[in-house]
Image (spheres, rainbow, N blue to C red):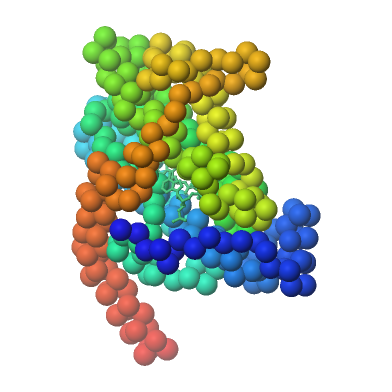
Amino acid sequence: MYSQALNTKETAADTSPEATRFQARIDAEDRIEPNDWMPEAYRRTLIRQISQHAHSEIVGMLPEGNWITRAPSLRRKAALLAKVQDEGGHGLYLYAAAETLGVAREELTDQLLSGRAKYSSIFNYPTLTWADIGTIGWLVDGAAIMNQIPLCRCSFGPYARAMVRICREESFHQRQGYEIVMTLCQGTPEQKAMAQDALNRWWWPCLMMFGPPDGASEHSDTSMRWKIKRFSNDGLRQKFVDATVPQGRYLGLTFPDPDLRFDDESGHWRFGPIDWDEFRRVLAGDGPCNRERLEARRKAHDDGAWVREAALAYAAKQRIAA
Ligand code: BYC
């Protein structure tokens, strides 16, 4: 269902004097700003990644938004409402960062709504119980932080600066999630079982968030040379597992992986094989909630048409008056 047009493999092979100077700036840890010369492939790579990231934040509001009216207390409701609003804000900063590269937000929205653009696979899974909200905060935001802290040092200035605030807010999201799961784990046996069930369902999809294994990651080499990415997909996945397993064990939860074990020699938690067929199915549009998520976004867009029309009519009136 996704357009191949968005899916061209970029290379950093340009040997022109501008490209050589550009790479020297990257190597010297200089920041690239929107009006600076940049290879077209660098621009396209950033538009692809930043827009997919923005779409993920916007679609990511849906699974949690689904629980705002059912939060178990006023305190939980206020925190969840704030978190979901933060995600809307992250989407907006990121669309603005992408626009500095010369693409219109309308075009990016169109790519999402027409199914041509990707967004994170994780948001195609359902939120079945309140424990899922805690688990999303703990694991999904935990994975997001692991991936996004290095993006604060991305070579492209507007993306790197947007990520600083986003990471601070993600850190609050992760803590509120862990606290929900901790409360459930210290509650009744039924509550603890609910937390365990949520971990069982979310663990593997969270490991997939980091993207395909390094050997199959088509963009990693170029993006790392351009210092858009600082770590490989597998490198970040391992850091996430190492940070998260002790947190789960502290809660008395069991990870749904019979192969999970601590390797004394390397100092890492080793985990079993990831089901990459499932990942590919979700990316191809056939995950549990892909259709529902896109329908919800299309409906929101259609319902908001009058706001866009009113804003345009107001702007036209102002132009006539001026
Ligand atoms: N889901 O060559 P690769 C959040 C695609 S928001 C879907 O390794 P790259 C949050 C990839 O796009 C979370 N697609 O690519 C929000 C590429 O396809 P295209 C989002 C995936 O770009 C609300 C192809 O697979 N975070 O955390 O070097 C509430 C080959 O992959 C996925 C970001 O977007 C996936 N999981 O590396 C709570 C962070 N993985 O474009 C939380 C910014 C891979 O060729 N993005 N693909 O059609 C990145 O860091 C990188 O883009 C990725 C992938 C690590 C995700």
Please tell me which residue is depicted at 65% across the width and 20% down the height of the picture.
266
Q: What is the quadrant of residue 124 in the picture?
A: top left
In this orientation, which residue lies closer to the viewer: 111 or 88? 111
Please state the horizontal and vertical placement of residue 255, each as a whole percent of the image: 40, 19
Q: Is residue 174 left or right of residue 127?
A: right
Q: What percent of the width, then of the height, locates residue 235?
A: 59, 35
Looking at the figure, which quarter contains the C terminus? bottom left
Closest to the observer: 293 or 100?
293
The total of numbered circles placed on residues is 0
- What residue sits 42% from the left and 25% below the top? 178
Q: Position of residue 245 (x, y in %)?
A: 49, 20
Residue 318 position (above or below residue 237): below
Front-most of residues 63 and 115 = 115
Residue 228 visible in the snapshot? no
Q: Quadrant of the N terminus?
A: bottom left
| Residue for point 33% across, 85% down | 317
**Vertical side of 263 occupied by 127: above or below:** below
Instruction: Look at the picture and state if 313 lies above or below 117.
Output: below
Residue 118 can be seen, yes or no: yes
Q: Is residue 281 above or below residue 43?
A: above
Q: Residue at x 26, y 28 (%)?
A: 130
List x then y, in percent, for residue 226.
66, 56
